[in-house]
Amino acid sequence: MKDLRKHLEERALTLRRHTIRMIGKAQSGHPGGSLSAADIMAVLYFHKLNIDPKKPDWPDRDRFVLSKGHACPVLYAALAESGFFPVDELLTLRTLGGRLEGHPDMRKLPGIEISAGSLGQGLAVANGMALAARLDGRKARIYVLMGDGECQEGEVWEASMFGAHHKLDNVVGIIDYNNLQIDGFVSDILEIQPLKEKWESFGWHTMEIDGHDVMAIVEAFDAVESIKGRPSMIIAKTTKCKGVSFMENKAEYHGKAPSGDELEKAMEELSCIEMIEPDNKEGC
Amino acid sequence: MRDAFVRSLFELAGEDPTVFFLTADLGVFIFDDFKTAYPGRYINLGIAEANMIGVSAGLAASGKMPYAYSIAPFITSRCLDQIRVDICYHRSNVKLVGVGAGFVYGSLGATHHAIEDIAVMRALPGMTVIAPADPLEAEKATRAIHDLDGPAYLRLGRNNDPVVYGSEPGFKIGKANIVRSGKDAAIIATGTAVYSALQAADMLDRDGIDVRVIDMHTVKPVDMEAILQAEEEAGALITVEEHNILGGLGSAVAEVLSEHTGVKKPFRRLGLKDTFCTSVGTPEYIREQYGLDPKNIARTIQDILADGSR
């Protein structure tokens, strides 16, 4: 068990390093929600998801839907590290002619299950995938990563009712609850609490966990597999920009790339200086 | 048209196990046969259109072909962003079906009239937009969009729609049907306006004016050839649609004319003049109120032929 923790923590660190390098190189992107979700993504892509990068369209695969599309740097990093495309390509984030757009495009990049960028829509799409999987008798599970601010969208609650009504126990939602959105704290802008009670009252099996404890994430994903007859929602308490101390818990880093000294400091904290190719150093 | 659609979809579902029917709590009883025969593929999602579009996209991403159904404004503008992102951006194989074209739901008031749906759907990249003229054509269109790989919007009347075609019409997406020949003027119409156009042509015939009527069932991609041919051969051109004058069939025809030949012949667009229908009543009554009845269509042609101006 200790080895698994170590392994997943290392993978999460790798995802954070890629995220900062990509956004630093592009000098644009959303670091906040990528860094807060890095541990969740590490558990999904390097432990939980039943996927095969050689067969991205394999019908029995598990699906991962990134509903908060702006966190795509961490998804790109996870896909590249899983072998869906070369790791080198990560540094082409948001560049002309590149496949790594500012929000993910399923028609461009293998491994993206659905394009996203307009918030609140992923859970409904996951519902459709879950229905199809159940009708076709497939064991595939559909994982959806949502933002906490995203829960302000009405469609989330339409989808929530639908998932419970149709007993979609092959759907696992994860809310990256970092309590920050563009303009400040979620609780100051439009309160979503009591969130656990909301999901429970909508008929979902609901858990609250520490979203930076990889083993807690593993255990939660394992635990919800035995829940039958209703979908599950895991509310993962996280810190926005987790891993870079001076960026942590600051709304301004929702969609701002660190630059100059900040970027250097961020990379130092993540010990990723040695990861930079010399010719990229300036750009990073 | 609604019953024709229901019948065709039932047949299609028997032929193709990927066909699903999704409704946002509309038309539930008329789909009982479908529901009984294919229970897993019939879903009433409740009054939640945004989720219905997302679920459709998820089904399509898993190899299914959903037909998502509601009253026209609620399956188009109500959930526009979901259609844009979840369906059009992915080029999802989802078919949207709206009943109540124009003011078919006349007495229900402006919330239920569909007067912007063509414009809004036409603006979405990759969306095919079809408005059949009568039940036989609606059957053909229901099948045609099944054979199309990609998103489509099917704009239907309801029931008791007028009959334009005595026998099964030819139907090809993007290829207009000429339902009446003539050269003094040409009327290009779509949906239930085709019948009004034919009636207007009959009236004009009595005065010795020979009018071509073109059923532009596919508003996108519009049939450029049929438009340019009419421009060349007819003495005047008008478009008729039960829709706002902005962005619909008239706009599509004007775009083609202005970019190709320039508008050389007298040309008018008939539609709602950027207004809601605040008159409540039968479709016939509303047509009269807003100048879309056969008499006014005929009068417009007489006026432009007499005037000769563009």
Image (cartoon, helix red, strand yellow):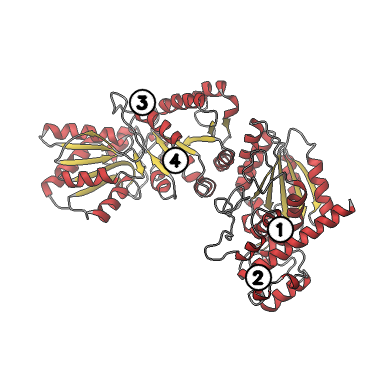
> Mark 3 = which residue?
B160
Horizontal side of B94 relative to B166 (left or right) equals: right
- Between disc 4 and disc 2, the foreground one is 2
Mark 2 is surrounded, within 10 Å at the Cα level, by few (under 14), some (14 to 19) or many (20 or more) other residues, namely many
Image quarter for residue A139? top right
The answer to whether residue A194 is seen in the rendering is no
Q: Is residue A277 above or below residue A3?
A: below
> Mark 1 = which residue?
A187
Query: Which numbered marker is on residue A126?
Result: none
From the viewer's side, name the closer residue of A67 and A49.
A49
Tags 2 and 3 on a common chain: no
- Between disc 2 and disc 3, the foreground one is 2
- Which numbered disc, 1 or 2, marks the residue that appears first in the sequence? 2
Q: Residue at x 70, y 78 (%)?
A: A261
Q: CA distance from mark 1 to mark 2?
A: 29 Å
Tags 3 and 1 on a common chain: no
Query: Which numbered marker is on residue A24?
Result: 2
Mark 3 is surrounded, within 10 Å at the Cα level, by few (under 14), some (14 to 19) or many (20 or more) other residues, namely few
Q: CA distance from mark 1 to mark 4?
A: 41 Å
From the viewer's side, name the closer residue of B18 and A177.
B18
